Amino acid sequence: MFTKLLNLEPKRREAIINAALKEFGAKGYDDASTNVIAKEAGISKGLMFHYVNNKKDFFLFLHDYTLAIIKEKYFDLVDYDEKDIFERLRQTYLLKVKVMQQYPLIFEFIKVAISTESDAVKKELDERRKKTENASFNKFYGDIDVSKFREGLDVEKCRQLIFWAVGGYANQIQAVSEIEINEVDFEKIRVEFDSYLDELRKSFYNEK
């Protein structure tokens, strides 16, 4: 469906995609203006729809496009031979930060896609997200070394608690805007993140 857009020369293609990510990320699906996207991309609205069909299809394409980048730059680079859950989490966090620095508009857009209540796209997004979340959780945390957990703990519940705790912290970092991201001290955040992981280790792991 989006062959025409994807076959454009890179500079023009990225101009259209980035303009859309910026507008949807700032205003959400319903309030985003295709006029603004076209103007920001430096093309006419008619020509833009020649490439992207319509607003809804474009939004869903952007959702899949951003997830493909995250898969390539994030999911596929994780060392799954590392079985310690906290080391695995540390890896994924550092990779996520790197993607945020390279593609700040992506995470603004994804936040909107996750939280949108728009009837126009919510059903399709929920179906996509459910499949992605289930697959991601099992891939990231389904093969961890459970021998390190203290005896008597429910490991499955512990994994979920750890996942929620780290996800909550990561969401705070992800909440920074495109402008703010260039001013964030990620090394300071890394040190702080490591300290939280150390506290979680003390709570769930055997003392050795």
Image: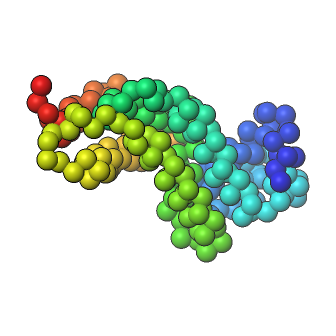
- Eyeballing the image, is 87 above or below 128? above
> Looking at this view, is 184 or 127 the one in front?
127
Q: Residue 169 appears at what percent x and percent y? A: 32, 44
Q: Residue 104 appears at what percent x and percent y? A: 54, 39
Q: Quadrant of residue 89?
A: top left
- Eyeballing the image, is 39 above or below 69? below
> Looking at this view, is 204 or 92 the one in front?
204
Q: Residue 203 appears at what percent x and percent y? A: 15, 40
- At a point 65% along the width and 72% down the height, the residue shown is 120
> Looking at this view, is 29 or 60 the one in front?
60
Q: Quadrant of residue 56?
A: bottom right
- At a point 71% along the width and 53% down the height, the residue shown is 61
Q: Residue 158 appears at what percent x and percent y? A: 25, 48
131 left or right, relative to 79: right
Quarter occupied by the N terminus:
bottom right
- At a point 79% along the width and 33% down the height, the residue shown is 10
Colour convention of the picture = rainbow
Q: Is residue 27 in view?
A: no
